[in-house]
Image (cartoon, helix red, strand yellow):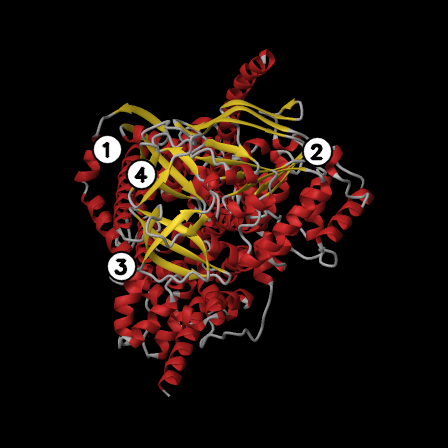
Amino acid sequence: MNAVPRNASTAQSVRFINVGKSYGNVRAVSGINITIAPGQFVTLLGPSGCGKSTTLNMIAGLEMPTEGQILIGDRDVTTVKPADRDIAMVFQSYALYPHLTLYENIAFPMRARRRRSPEPEVDNKVRTAARMLGLDGMLSRYPREISGGQRQRVALGRAMVRTPTVYLLDEPLSNLDQQLRVQMRSELKDLHQRLGATMLYVTHDQSEAMTLSDLIVVMSAGRIEQVGTPRDLYDRPANLFVARFLGEPGMNILNGESKSGSLVGKGFSLPLPATVGVPAEQLSIGIRPENIEHDPSENAPIKGIVRTVEFLGSRSLVRIDVGDALVSAFLPATVQLSAGGAVGLRPSDPAKVRFFDTQTGLSV
Amino acid sequence: MTTAVEISVDSSRALDSVARKTRIVGSALVGPALILVVAINVLPAFYGFYLSLRQVFFFGDEGYVGLQNYVALFRDPFAWQAMGRSLIFTFGSLVIAVPLALVSAMGIRRLGKWGSILLTVLLVPWAMSPIVVALLWKWILVPSPGGLVGAVFAAFGMPPQDLLTDPILAMPTLILIAVWRNFAFAAIILTGGLGQIPRDLYKAAAMDGLGAWEAFRKITLPLLASSLLIVISMLTISYFNEVQTIIGLTGGGPIRQTTTLGYLLYHTGFVELDQGRGNAIAIVMFMINMLLIALYIKILGKQPGAAA
Amino acid sequence: MKTGTRNGLLLLGCLLAALVALGPIVWAFSTSLKPTNRIFQVPPELIPSVSTLDHYARLISEGVHRAFLNSGLYAFLAVAVALVLGTVAGYSLARYPIPGKQLVLVLFVGAMAVPGFAVLLPTQLLFVNMGLYNTYVALPLLYAGHILPFAVWVTRSHFNTIPRELEQAAQIDGYSRFEAVWKVVLPGAKPALLAAATFGFLHSWNDYVTATTMVDTPGLRTLPVALIFFQGFHGRDWGALMAGVIIATIPPVVMFLLFRKYLIGGFADGSVKG
């Protein structure tokens, strides 16, 4: 255990101060301000093209920002070469060196001229890392001779032996099949806890982000939408984008107008709580699928037509057309519904209904 | 707070300089190669054009003469004859080489491992020096019953023929030797092109009731079109500029029957040392090359799914 | 039955093709081993009943081996220069932002398409004026210039296929950019480098027109030029001439056979996939 030291001592904070990056006239990312505490697991989450990989590459030094600063610990690394940043990165493609054995791949960072370790130490660290990752016995193989999951572990091993200040992980699980992905996800979580390292993780998969992270940074179109813990983001999305993006399926959004203390739209009419007041004429409500329940009564606040019913065992995922919107709801399997039939719904807990300004998309 | 702003001014300056540095490094790395290529391949073309406007004889520059070299060239019936010979040589070789390469490529595909061995064997002549090929074939064609071709004639009860000095047979002989030398190069590209046609298409065609010939015409040829055009363009340019085998085999003779434009350039510029005129021929050849390349790029560009 | 006949025909065609391709070379080899008085023997003998190495010895006594060494030296220098400059340029064209990159690429492709022969005459005058005519540098320099566009092209195509992440990973692992390229990218570039080297060697070794127009002194001649001169003096000495054909053919053919996989791949990549 000593040979692969916990990174707690080396783990560093990361700070982005007003970082932006343009390619010619195209702004890839702008106004990035993030503070990451040492030892935190932070995920950059967003759809492809949202600028999350660019942001990660800027910490790595693979891309230079066009404005702002990046600090690792107290050190301004904005223009420092990747080799001098003391970071480790796991790539989506793993980027294993095809002409080197697994042993040589993992040892590679410790054999760099600028920080060469003595060979006995290299050997010790490679073997310990291999043991931790279940790679012992195959160290003399080449990357092409092992499976995707094993490649993934080699890439992690190569990062670990460095005892870096920060781990950068760029969609490391996206090339694995579903089952392996879930398994590696928990291995990764376990590894983070054992190493106590600062890890920065990029993904477009919100379930990965939710299960792994201490902190999630949701990005879209080159900007940060919201920063918070998984629970914060899930319960209190700051805007419509985050509301829709998180959750499987995402939050249901219904657009309406405020009329004498109620929000009224096609197929629904819900009272506006006093805490919300009437901040704007056009408002949207957001309800998570699990916060909806069946309301068989005449005056159900939400009324729609069942489109599909997916039986999931203990409950069913029901898709319902409400006005122009398609609402998803998890309903007990005991509720008998069939496609094409009318159905009444209501929020199970009015406190969990969110309200957004339709124009700005912001939570109110 | 103030410090952060200060650092940020510094780092924005540093960022600019990093970006500038990358551009400079990139250019510095391409520089030497670019300079050498421009010096060896591009500058001489311009110098040649300059010289073609001057009277240059035996390395002595006797001054500007305008288009006189070109005018003389266009009035020279021998130059037109050479142009004709170039066309005959180029298209004669193409007409034989391309179908031969296509047939070989299809055989090579069908034979699998043995096919690639056959391809290697067929490429051996291509790996040889053209002038050495000329020497070799001079001996093969030597007009004596002791020569290889002479022995073949003898077997049919015919006296040995000197194919290379026969005004009618010299050109076809040159063409056959040119094809022998490099048709297999075309077969490489066609084999590669055939390899990209999914085999399932032929299965589907067989189910649709197409015969072998029909499948060839309706599947192979259209899908091979871009490879064929590449092959035809490369061979055209290579045959049009062929000069070494002609120097070695016939020296442009007999009675100018094998004097192509390329050989005329060689003879005018390097043997007669009429360098002004030679450069005019070179420029004309250069233009024709450019025209051919442009033509092929245009045709290839229009080809759907073309690789170029 | 039908496929049987077809395969039979195919086999026959192959044998015939192989015979036509190799027959003349085998015949030349046979001739080079025959004593002079048996060379024109009727009927001709494929396997000489009496054989001798006299013709090869004669080439050496006439100093042709000197030309052989020159050819090798020129080809080696040209390939070395072209590979170093070409790899560096190919890499930076694949990876760096370079002002006017499109133009540079067009220039390299254009230079590859234009046959060197069309610019040989002005080159000769340039070299005469610059004092490079008839020197040891003349031919390596020209050959390097001829090979370079192809070298740039294959290496660039190759680097384009290597994921950038590989060298980025190495840089993050603590290596400088140069070290990353040297240790991680170049080992995988062997096929492209060998394709360029083989092409370059064949081009340089096999050339005649450039060599005959750029050097003059016997001591500077290449093998093909020396053989043509030898033919000029001893036109009917077919035994020695065929010995010359054989020694001029062995190096490029061996080189081609060794690396044909890479060369064929390089051409197929360069032309079909663009």
Q: CA distance from mark 1 to mark 2?
A: 79 Å
Q: In x, y percent, where is residue A172?
A: 57, 47
Task: Reply above or below: C47 against A116.
Answer: below
Q: Which residue is mark 1?
A: B69
Q: In x, y percent, where is residue B196?
A: 39, 61
Q: Nearer the viewer, mark 2 or mark 4?
A: 4
Sequence-wise first label, 1 or 3: 1
Looking at the picture, which amino acid does disc 1 mark? Asn
Q: CA distance from mark 1 to mark 3?
A: 30 Å
Given the image, what chain letter belongs to the residue carrying mark 4?
A
Looking at the picture, which amino acid does disc 4 mark? Val
| Quadrant in which the C terminus of chain A is drawn | top left
The dot on residue A11 is 2
Left or right: residue C153 versus residue B103 is right
Other residues around mark 2 within 10 Å, as few (<14) / some (14–19) / many (≥20): many
Given the image, what chain letter belongs to the residue carrying mark 3?
B
Kind of element beneath mark 2? loop
